[in-house]
Amino acid sequence: MKESKPSDYYTAREVADRMGVSKMTIYRMARSGDLPGAIPFGPRLIRIHKVTFDLYLAEQQGPPAGDVDQVHFQMDNEESETLR
């Protein structure tokens, strides 16, 4: 199992800045269980697991601009035949 390092976590301030909310909002979200990856290190200190938070944030923001259906892929004939 991989050992966690401090660089694997965001601070409450970093998460607040990325979400555009106050640091207190981050503490409230962590306390209520609405912030995945939040780990308390006492009543006034939390860290948020980077990978978990990044996935959560991407999920909250929805799909990127431009639907996948609108993207056109160019394939050579061999690839096209493989898909048929």
Image (cartoon, grey):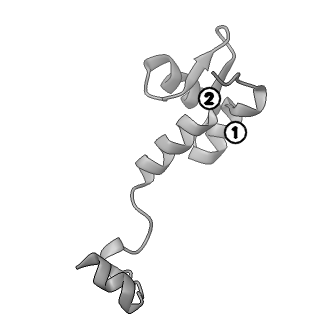
Q: Position of residue 72 (x, y in %)?
A: 38, 85
Q: Which residue is at a point 38% across and 86% down the rendered structure image? A: 78
Q: Which residue is at a point 67% across and 8% down the rendered structure image? A: 42
> What's the amino acid at mark 2?
Ile
Circle number at residue 26 = none
Check disc 2 and report its element: helix, strand or loop.
Answer: strand
Give me the C-alpha separation between circle 1 and circle 2.
Answer: 9 Å
Circle number at residue 14 = 1
Q: Which residue is mark 2?
A: 48
State if disc 2 and disc 1 touch (CB < 8 Å).
Answer: yes
> Image quadrant of residue 13?
top right
Q: Position of residue 50 (x, y in %)?
A: 63, 37
> What's the amino acid at mark 1?
Glu
Question: Where does the N terminus fall, quadrant-wise?
Answer: top right
Q: Residue furthest right?
A: 6
- Please say if 73 is above or below 41: below
